[in-house]
Amino acid sequence: MQNLYDEVGFLDRRCYEEFALNEEILMEHAADGIADFIRRNFQKGSSILIATGSGNNGADGITLARLLYKEYEVALWFVKEPKSPMCRLQHKRAQKTGIEPINMPQSRYDIVVDAVLGTGFAGEFNEELRQKMRQLNSTKGYKIACDVPSGLRKEGTCEQDTFVAETTLTMGALKKGMFLDEAKEYTGNIKVLDLGVSRVIYEVPSNWKLLEHTDMMLPSREKKNTHKGSFGHTAVIAGEKAGAAILAASSALRIGSGLVTLIECEPHIIPYELMRSEHLPANTTTIAVGMGLGTIWSDEELETLLRNNLPIVADADILYTQRVKTLLKRDNIVITPHPKEFVALLKLLNLAHIDTPTLQKNRFKYAELFCKAYPNVTLLLKGANVIVGKNNEFFINDKGSSKLAKGGSGDVLSGIVAGLLAQGYTPLEAATNATLIHTKLAELYNGSSFSLTPAKLIEKMDKLGG
C-alpha cells in the first residue's frame, strides 16, 4: 500500500531542511521524470504540446520543454504568462535554448501535456481560462497531466472543464484528492515521480493509504487436519428481497466460510449448498444482516437473532433503523453502506444532515467524522473508489470499475466480508481484503463492461490466486 497526503508541500520543505535540496533541484527532477516517461513511451520526433500556467506547475512544463527541445517537436503554449520566480527563471532558460511560445495550438499533437495549474488550485476558472481549458481538452493527442489535472482541487472536487488526462505524473507522493470519486474521470493512470530522493526518504507515514492488489490476503487452507467447522459458520438473515441475502450467502460460502445458513422466516428456493433455519445456529461465528431485509421480521424476532456479540456485517436496510445504534456499540462490526445509506445513517446518528451530492464531494471528511465518533466500527463506504476506515486508519481502493455498477454487486461484497470474518479475519482485515477481492473479481471478468452479473462475480472466485 502507498501513503496518501492532503498536500505535499511539507514534504518538499523537509527536503530543503533535512537533505539540503532546494526548489530548483526538485523541479528539475520533476521535469526529468516526465521527460523520461515520454522518451520511454513515444518515438523521438513526436509532436508535443506543453500548456503552462503562471506558477511552479507552469515552471515544470517550461523545464520539460527545454529538456525535450530538438529531440521532439515541442510547442510551448502559455495559457497563463509566467509570474512566479521559478516560472520566470525557467522561461529565461527556455528562451536561451531557442524555445519561443506559440500563440495558438494546433488541433492535433502526438502528446498533450497539461502544466497549467497544480495542487494549489482553488475556486473556479474565469471565462478566459475556461475557454483555454476547453481548447486544451479538445486538442487531439495522448494527454498527460503534470502533478494533477488542472482544475482538480486539493479536496478532490473538480472544476468544470478540468483537464482529462490519460496519465497523471504526480510529484513526490500521492495526493489524496486524486482519489475522490469525482476525480476518477480526470486522472487516468497515476504514476509518482521522484524528486531527487527516493519515495522511501521523501515520504513520512500517513494515516491514509492506497490499497494495492498485492495487499490482498486470501484465505488459507494449508493445514490438512481440518473440517468444515474449522472455517467458520456464516448466518445471513434473509428478508423481503431474499435474492440479496442469497447472493451474500453464496459469496460467503465461495470465499471459504465452512458453513453458511440462510436465516428465513419464510421459505425460499435457495442453492442446494446453503443451509436454512428460522433460528440462529448455535455454532454461528458471523452474522450478515440488512441486505434486502425490508420489514418482514418483527422487532422481537430481530432482537432475538442479534442479541449476541458475534462479528457482524451490517448493510443496506438495517442502516436506516434505530436498531443500528445498538449494533454500532459492538467492537467486531463492519458496516457497508453505499452513499445514500451512509447519508441516512449520518442523519440517524445526528452526526451530519447532508444530501448525497454533498457527501460525494466530501467523502474523506465524513468518513473521518464517522470513524472519530465510532472508533470501534469498521466502515466500508462504497463508491467508485471504496473507502475503508476504522478509528484513525483509512484505506482507499481505487481499483473499482463500472462493471460493478449493477444491483447485487454490493451484496456479493458484504458476503465476502462476512465470509472472511467467519474465518477469523479482524473487521479491518475483512473489509480491506473484501474490497480488493471484489474489484479483482471484476478485473477477471472478460465479458463486456455492461454484462457482469453478481452471479458471475461469485463464479470468478475460483480464479483468485491463480
Image (tube, rainbow, N blue to C red):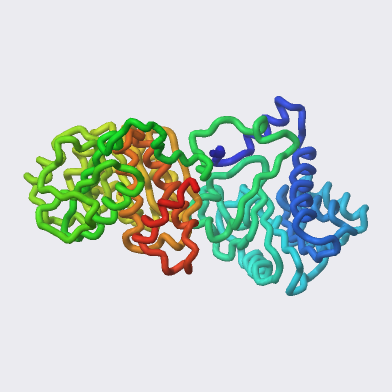
State the image coordinates of residue 310 (x, y, percent, origin top left).
22, 34
Q: Nearer the viewer, residue 379 or 353?
A: 379
Q: Nearer the viewer, residue 175 or 264?
A: 264
Q: Residue furthest top?
A: 18
State the image coordinates of residue 63 (x, y, percent, origin top left).
81, 50
What number of labels is visible?
A: 0
Q: Nearer the viewer, residue 334 or 286?
A: 286
State the image coordinates of residue 420 (x, y, percent, origin top left).
34, 40
Q: Residue at x 20, y 58 (%)?
A: 270
- Location of residue 7 with respect to 265 vertically, above or below: above
Left or right of 82: which side holds 289? left
Q: Residue at x 67, y 50 (%)?
A: 169
Q: Is residue 132 visible?
A: yes
- Location of residue 350 with respect to 239 vertically, above or below: above
State the image coordinates of residue 236 (x, y, percent, origin top left).
22, 48
Left or right of 232: which side holds 240? left
